[in-house]
Image (cartoon, helix red, strand yellow):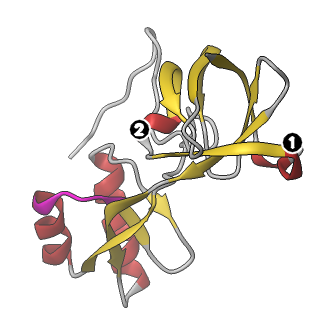
Amino acid sequence: MQRAIAHVDADNWPADAAADSIILDFNARHRRRIRLKTDAGEAVLLDLPKAAAMADGDGLRLDDGRWLAVRAAAETLLEVRCADPKVLVRVAWHLGNRHLPTEVRDDCLRIRLDHVIAQMLWGLGAQVAEVQAPFQPEGGAYGGHGHGGHSHGATRGHGHGN
């Protein structure tokens, strides 16, 4: 079984040399070690030195020198739109306060499907619709590109003042 031993950001690998691709949902794109199957059916062991936050278009180098293109799988998401920019800012604050991975797009926000959060968003005045799309949430101040989570470390913390 081939091993994927290096992760490279989208703009820094020879994408035209990709021998195959691998479609992964958001959770599967943040890993260090896992057995995967390429789109052509080849078994590959993801075996990175540390966990990587992979994004659509990134590359994985196999131990035999070949490249795999990482593709983001479509997932069921909530697309959040607001006619009033002030409402959008308020909605974004509430999502961040709940540490929800959020994809910030030009005209909307996208989050994972969550009916309780959808009710909250409607109550705040947002329009919410289910969509099928790749999910690439913001990495945040503590994460890499599109990581979607963060850690404060042992000595850092923050409050959620009300």
Q: Amino acid at mark 2?
A: Asn
**Callout 1 amino acid:** Asn
Which residue was labeled with disc 2? Answer: 27
Q: Which residue is mark 1?
A: 12
Residue 42 image position (x, y, % from top left): 58, 32
Instruction: Find the magenta span and give its range.
Output: 111-115
Q: Secondary structure at mark 1?
A: helix
- Quarter containing the N terminus: top right
How would you rate the neighbour count of disc 2 (Cα within 10 Å): few for under 14, some for 14-19, many for 20 or more?
Answer: few
Residue found at the far bottom of this picture: 83
Decide if residue 82 is on the left or right side of residue 65.
Answer: left
Q: Position of residue 132 (x, y in %)?
A: 37, 69
Q: Position of residue 155 (x, y in %)?
A: 45, 10
In the displayed structure, would residue 77 be above or below residue 82?
above
Callout 1 crowding tier (Cα within 10 Å): few <14, some 14–19, many ≥20: few
Secondary element under disc 2, as helix, strand or loop, is: helix
